[in-house]
Amino acid sequence: MLALMVTKEGLPVGYDVFQGNMSEGHTFKYAIEKIKTRYCIKKVVVVADSGLLSKENIALLEQENLEYVLGARLKSLPITWQDKILDNTDFEKKVKKEDLLRIATFSYSEKRRLIVTHSTSLKKIYIFFAYTHYMNLIRI
């Protein structure tokens, strides 16, 4: 597994390679600790795929006061949220290169938001849990 640290512009500044037999949940905590000790960074927004979405990892991020955007799976959300997302009447619609994109942001809890995008050409829904003050910087 590879942990890659990048600037807000996407430029790489560091990385760590973890053993393949280590689960992502275990490497995540270690990677967070390493980032804090190795780099003098004042502001971090952790971006990770749905493999790292767990109650333990969210608790770790919030305990460390780190902002995050984590991929989520539709089937792992409560049924009421699944229905709301699949209804997609609250979505903003944008056309991008012959693709109709539907985009919505929902207040999931006091601290967390759900960002949902649906691409008609890819026939795929992407869902992210987010806890960040930079929501206005997320663009499609």
Image (cartoon, helix red, strand yellow):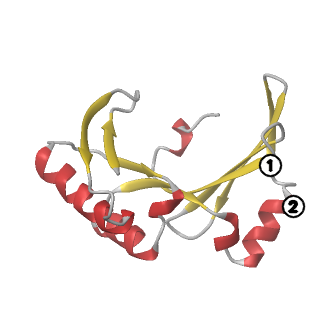
Q: Extreme top residue here?
A: 97
- What residue would you read off at disc 2? 87
Relative to 33, is 94 above or below? above
Q: Secondary structure at mark 2?
A: helix
For numbered disc 1, what is the local secondary structure?
loop
Q: Residue at x 65, y 34 (%)?
A: 140
User: What's the residue type where badge 2 is placed?
Assistant: Asp
Tell me the crowding category of disc 2: few under 14, some 14 to 19, or many 20 or more residues within 10 angstroms, Cα based. few
The answer to whether 78 is drawn above or below residue 45 in the figure is: below
Front in this rendered view, residue 44 or 136: 44
The answer to which image quadrant residue 55 occupies is: bottom left
Kindly identify the residue that appears in the image at 43 percent across and 54 percent down.
68
Q: Position of residue 2 (x, y in %)?
A: 33, 46
Q: Is residue 130 left or right of residue 94?
A: left
Q: What is the x, y in percent for residue 100?
A: 84, 35
Relative side of 81 to 17, left or right = right
Q: Is residue 1 left or right of residue 125?
A: left
Mark 1 packing: few (<14 Cα in 10 Å), some, or many (20+)?
A: some
Rendered image: mark on residue 91: 1
Where is residue 133 shown, x and y percent of the image?
45, 49
Front disc: 2 or 1: 2
Distance Cα–Cα, label 2 vs label 1: 9 Å
Residue 3: give x, y in percent of width and height.
32, 47
Q: Which mark is residue 48?
A: none
Q: Residue at 44% of width from left, 62% of height from top?
A: 52
124 relative to 29, above or below: above
Q: Kindly identify the residue that appears in the image at 27 percent across and 64 percent down.
A: 29
